[in-house]
Image (cartoon, rainbow, N blue to C red):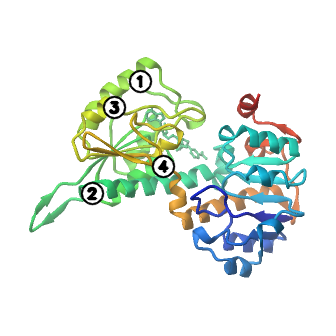
Amino acid sequence: VHVAVPKESAPGERRVALTPEVVARLVKEGCAVRLEHGAGEGAFFTDEAFHLAGAEVVEGHELYSGVEVVFSVGPLPLEVIHQLSADTVLVSFQYPYRDPERVRAMAERGLSALAMELIPRITRAQSMDALSSQATVAGYKVALLAANLSSRFFPMLTTAAGTIRPAKVLVMGVGVAGLQAIATARRLGANVWAYDVRKAAAEQALSLGAKIIELPISAEGEGGYARELTEEEKRMQQEALAKEIGGMDVVITTAQIPGRTAPILITQDMVARMAPGAVIVDLAAESGGNCELTRPGEVVEASGVRIYGPLNLPSELAIHASEMYAKNLYNLAKLLIKDGHLAPDWSDEILAGALLVHGGQVVHGPTQELIK
Ligand code: NAD
């Protein structure tokens, strides 16, 4: 199988889809891997390391001829899609709602596109679950960013200059990223509280040493995700949380609902009731934000409270984020490649679930709606 790995095209993206370690494994299993010159640079994997692993390092214009599978982190740009021959399999995060035009182009071209964010969250697919691996990275980093923005220590300190109490940190939304944020803030010595609308999440947070904020709202949705709250529930939630948030030094928010804009958990009014010097870091900034005042990619200050909505945190930990993503791809590749040949079974639950475009059609229901 001829496999290609491009240099990522999104501004600021430092990750690379495959690492030398995974390239070596694929080559051993009969793949011919071609890598765009400098593709690993942002994650500190040199062309030479890829070459030693058995990849052919080429210029961009030589990358795609005869290629059967393209592995990337973000979606391929339109001009690349137009160069690919029918039946090429593309594997990456696809974000169809950001650019429906691109999805249509992939279908017209006869490509098969798998979206890493659509891999079903079933036990067998755990090793391919890039949403989880990248959320783990983001959750770790968001806690560090919060510590960095705070004007207080996280740990308790007993010093000759007096005793310092540990920071009070609240993590709202305790999925994969939230749990990692809790673990990281705990390692830094903070006193950590957790809030989620799913009961299972609270239990997991408790096992990491967080205290739980319990409200009488339960919103377990399908597939282990949360459902959207009703207007009445939202009002009740904001009222109850306003008091809790008011006492926190740091609030980290990660609440998401699949396919929707993120729920607002912190209103402008709630920010005004926080103590000056408090910090909010909003991991949901990319999908609208959990705080009303969040501006994606910026730090804003309102009544002495700093609010940061960081974007693409996995890219900031490019080495480990790439290593984890590459392993996810390698495990998925086993479903695509048999004995060195491209032989996908499109009826396999995992491939079928992740398939966005195939056989000239957009096959993912919600995306079909989007491009109508
Ligand atoms: P996510 O990124 O979609 O959401 C983050 C968190 O926000 C979730 O815990 C959600 O409950 C919470 N949330 C949503 N609305 C909220 C609100 N109004 N108030 C407070 N919190 C709110 O979630 P995720 O991290 O991708 O994972 C969600 C679930 O999927 C978890 O239960 C996780 O264990 C499960 N999961 C299962 C597998 C698997 O079985 N292979 C893999 C990964 C994740």
Mark 3 crowd level (few <14, some 14–19, many ≥20, 10 Å Cα): few
Position of 195 with respect to 318 (left or right) is left
Estimate the spatial distance between the alpha carbons at disc 4 and disc 1, rounded to whole Å.
22 Å
Does the Cβ of the disc 1 residue fall within 8 Å of ligand 1?
A: yes
Estimate the spatial distance between the alpha carbons at disc 3 and disc 4, rounded to whole Å.
24 Å
Name the residue tied to disc 2. 154
Mark 4 crowd level (few <14, some 14–19, many ≥20, 10 Å Cα): many
Callout 4 secondary element: helix
Name the residue tied to disc 1. 234
Q: Disc 1, disc 3: CB below 8 Å? A: no
Quarter of the view holding residue 158:
bottom left
Position of 56 with respect to 137 (left or right) is right
Callout 3 secondary element: helix
Q: Disc 4, disc 2: CB below 8 Å? A: no
Q: In this view, does 208 lie above or below 237?
A: below
Does the Cβ of the disc 4 residue fall within 8 Å of ligand 1?
A: yes
Residue drawn 41% across and 17% down? 232
Callout 2 secondary element: loop
Name the residue tied to disc 3. 268
Q: How many labels does the image show?
A: 4
Q: In this view, does 322 lie above or below 122?
A: below
Position of 319 with respect to 19 (left or right) is left
Estimate the spatial distance between the alpha carbons at disc 1 and disc 3, rounded to whole Å.
15 Å
Task: Please provide percent x and percent y for residue 48.
Answer: 69, 81
Q: Which of 26 and 153 is in front in this view?
A: 153
Give, as a three-letter code, the residue at label 4: Ala
Q: Nearer the viewer, residue 295 or 360?
A: 295
Position of 199 with respect to 325 (left or right) is left
- Regarding residue 111, the answer to whether it shows in the image is yes
